[in-house]
Image (spheres, rainbow, N blue to C red):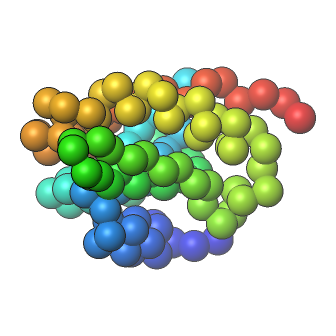
Amino acid sequence: MRTTLDLIEEMQTEAKTAERAALIVGLGKETKYVWSSDDNPLETLNQFVEAGGEPVGIVRVTQGAQECNSIDFRPLEEYANEEWVKRSLSSLAGTLQMLIVGETLKHKPKSDDGPQLPPAATD
């Protein structure tokens, strides 16, 4: 298992070629986000993990031509073969698109800004 520092470094690498990026953390029935723009993303991630959170994926937001934005989700390598993670991340795309387009891109998101993962289905 990778460390939280490893995960932050992966997310920051993703952010270098995007408007911003975030780790997606499942925490009970909630979804938390550790954005690349957080003041201290490692501390934020550690707090979520200590509270029982599980980092499952990364979201990247890129700004395209004419203010069209692209949002890409992917599971972390530890969850690359987990269908429930793929389904959950896929369902976040539309909701997050609405939150980020327009005014939301003009402010620095907080760690808990973003839609919630649906409950995990048992496979």
The reply to whether residue 49 is visible in this rendering is no
Q: Position of residue 38 (x, y in %)?
A: 20, 54
Q: Residue furthest right?
A: 123
Q: Position of residue 100 (x, y in %)?
A: 28, 35
Q: Position of residue 94 (x, y in %)?
A: 48, 28
In the depicted view, which residue is nearer to us: 71 or 80? 71
The quadrant where residue 109 appears: top left
Q: Residue at x 61, y 24 (%)?
A: 118
In the depicted view, which residue is nearer to us: 1 or 88? 88
Q: Residue furthest front?
A: 66
Q: Is residue 88 above or below residue 37?
A: above
Determine whether, in the image, residue 58 is placed left or right of residue 123.
left
Q: Residue at x 55, y 24 (%)?
A: 29
The quadrant where residue 21 appears: bottom left
The reply to whether residue 21 is visible in this rendering is yes
State the quadrant of the C terminus.
Answer: top right
Determine whether, in the image, residue 32 is placed left or right of residue 42.
right
State the quadrant of the N terminus.
Answer: bottom right
